[in-house]
Image (tube, rainbow, N blue to C red):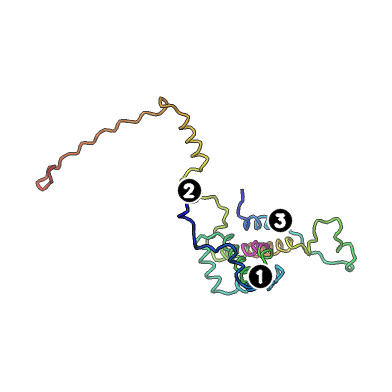
Amino acid sequence: METNPSLNVYNKIRNMKVEPVEEPKGGLLSKTMSTKGRKYKPNVDVTMRVARYVQDIKDYNNA
Amino acid sequence: MRDVDQVSLSRPIPGQSLTHELRARPWQNPPQFTTVEESMDWYLERFDNPEIVQELLSIIEMGIPLSTIANSMQLGAVLQGVHNIDVGVLIIPIIIEIMKTLAEKTDTKYVMGDEPEESDRPSDAVLESALNKIKGMTVEDMPEEEMMEEETDEEPMGLMARRA
């Protein structure tokens, strides 16, 4: 059982499926910016943002 | 139960944290940065400093797990009032990944903190089952001890040898 909370967070975020930043289309009221039917907003969700940073560093390391 | 003699008296007494003015400590004030991005800039400035990186790499080389170092770094920043604990927890994976990259780029051996412990000592479960097995055995089941042959000390034969 994993007992180290820091590693727990790290492993979860590292294995998270990263979604790219969505570019807004057609203004703030468009369907792209709508949050209906979604678990989270990939542009705003802080876990997704952190996962994206981790992925960027990982890609830099593997490059 | 702990022995009374072993109780440490060097600990803070209950309520000691309330003996100073409210907001006198950095972590009791609003944090300097409130987002992960702003706080990361603060960390990146430190990771950009060659002296700090050199020191960090030597700590990593000592075998301290990256998760422990990252946790200490974010906790230090919380105590300095840079960011709050929530932001600190969110920053941990980024710090670990940066340190991992630094270590791999500089060929420094690192420990993540989840490696299985290498020890010759059998696990507690194995010891427990062995003890239970021994407790269940009768005297007849016990293996007979081999008789130890008495070693006869040969008397030294030299001229200068001490006689018994």
Q: From the image, tell me which residue sits under label 3.
A: A16
In the rendering, which numbered label is found on residue B28? 1
Image position, residue A9 (x, y; %): 66, 57
Q: Secondary structure at mark 3?
A: loop
The 10 Å Cα crowd at callout 1, few under 14, some 14 to 19, many 20 or more, is: few
Q: Report whether B151 appears left or right of B138.
A: left
Chain of residue at mark 1: B
Mark 1 or mark 2: whose residue is earlier in sequence: 1
Chain ID of residue with mark 3: A
Q: Does the segment drawn in magenta span residue B92?
A: yes
Compared with B67, B52 (above or below) is: below
Q: The numbered mark 2 sits on a residue in which chain?
A: B
| Residues shaded magenta | B89-96
Look at the picture and state if B144 lies above or below A33: above
From the top left corner, tell me how far across and down residue B31 is, in percent. Answer: 68, 71
Residue at (67%, 69%) from the top-left corner? B83
User: Is A6 left, or right, of A42 in this rendering?
Assistant: left
Left or right: A57 in relation to A20: left
Identify residue type, mark 3: Met
Residues tagged by mark 1 and mark 2 found on one chain of the structure = yes
Number of marks: 3
Determine the secondary structure under disc 1: helix
Q: Is residue B70 above or below residue A8?
A: below
Q: Is residue A14 magenta?
A: no
The tag on residue B119 is 2
Secondary structure, mark 2, is loop
